[in-house]
Image (cartoon, rainbow, N blue to C red):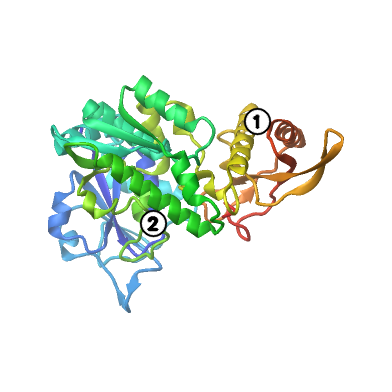
Amino acid sequence: MQQDMIVILDLGSEQNTLIARDIRALGVYTEIQPHDLTAEQLSALPNVRGIVLNGGVNRVVDGVAIDASDAVYNSGIPLLAVDHAAKKADRTLPAWPRDEAARRDALREFVFDVCKAQANWNMDNFIADQIELIRRQVGDKKVLLALSGGVDSSVVAALLIRAIGDQLTCVHVNHGLLRKGEPEQVVEVFRNQLGANLIYVDAVDRFLDKLAGVADPEQKRKIIGAEFIRVFEEEARKLNGIEFLGQGTIYPDIVESGTKTAKMVKSHHNVGGLPEDLQFELVEPLKMLFKDEVRACGVALGLPDSMVYRQPFPGPGLGVRCLGAITRDRLEAVREADAILREEFDRAGLRGKVWQYFTIVPDFKSTGVRNNARSFEWPVILRAVNTVDAMTATIEQLDWPVLLRITDRILNEVKGVNRVLYDLTPKPVGTIEWE
């Protein structure tokens, strides 16, 4: 079913994504487009019922105030101008109301009363549309997907399996830096339950040998990223007839990678794809979804909650939580302590209530007492933070019984550890991760 669309034209606002999420919450699909959208580009967008001309603090570019094209003004499509962003419009707001309810009321009036849009944006319709689009794009060709086990790649895999079945080949590279049980879960869910063509690559020794003695965090990241691409390329070139590459690009990846009126927040490895010599056409069915919508899509596709609501996890995995030069024994201490922390948070009813929680093992030891004898072992640092946008973060104030139970288990169950610490540093001054 073709959904009605409201287009948000970026005329320098910092609230484009906020408004997009508000409109989607009304059950109407929306996309953010550049301010200089042409007549051809506008006509190519399906079922456009209204356009929001969204002005803001970045409206002046190189000394000139940007505006929408004449094609937009002459389109006959209802227009809502924000922050004096336009020459003329059907509705004008001096600025978006700060009050969330008032903002949504203004949008609701424009979307439904002025634009006559229908609330037909939902996950079932999205999945049905994407299945049709994937089949149309791929035809009878084959698709390759790097399946990390993260939320985005897992949801893409489940959607591609439903759309094209055994035309999809997934490659899961175990680099030894995943959390406890994650490689096994990927194999169980995708190969055993969903029947995917899954290639499992045990590259643990290869990665850890490359990382031996490397203490600099950025150097570790570069080694992990480069080695992953090499392993993936090697596996891809063993296969015949692959013409498409599936990717878990999502909407924030595209938005954060920069627009014509906003500076890049951070570059994303999956905006632009892997090395050009692989010569694949990209299949990116989630590229217009926000993270919470990706999770809702995963639930609708039948993925387990433990995968859909997986904790945020850095690309280099536990490699940046085993501080300094990675050793196998400290890496195992991080992995085991992390598993205990997650089990106890689940037991305390904190899963889904705390944004991110994990353990860190630094590259130093302290004196302790174990079995009535001196011990010289590592500390484990616990970190639990809450955030909306990851730009700032506050510390979760854990109850003492929970902290004491976690501490007791780590000291008794994790080899080589004699202290447990709780990091109370917010962001700023600290960052969420230590490396």
The answer to which image quadrant residue 347 occupies is top right
The quarter of the image holding the N terminus is top left
Circle count: 2
Classify 10 Å Cα crowding around label 2: few (below 14), some (14-19), many (20 and above). some
The structure residue drawn at horizontal position 73% and vertical position 49%, both measured from the top left corner, is 365
Q: In the picture shown, does residue 10 fall above or below 23?
A: below
Residue 419, image x, y percentages: 75, 43
Q: Which mark is residue 344?
A: 1
Residue 64, image x, y percentages: 30, 77
Query: Can the viewer see residue 318?
Result: yes
Q: CA distance from mark 1 to mark 2?
A: 34 Å
- Secondary structure of the residue carrying tag 1 is helix
Nearer the observer, disc 1 or disc 2?
1
Q: Earlier in the sequence, mark 1 or mark 2?
A: 2
Q: In the picture shown, does residue 130 fall above or below 48?
A: above
Classify 10 Å Cα crowding around label 1: few (below 14), some (14-19), many (20 and above). some
Residue 343, image x, y percentages: 62, 29
The structure residue drawn at horizontal position 49% and vertical position 39%, both measured from the top left corner, is 176
- Secondary structure of the residue carrying tag 2 is helix
The answer to which image quadrant residue 206 occupies is top left
The quarter of the image holding the C terminus is bottom right
Pick the front one: 376 or 297 = 376
Q: In the picture shown, does residue 344 fall above or below 101?
A: above
Mark 2 lies on residue: 256
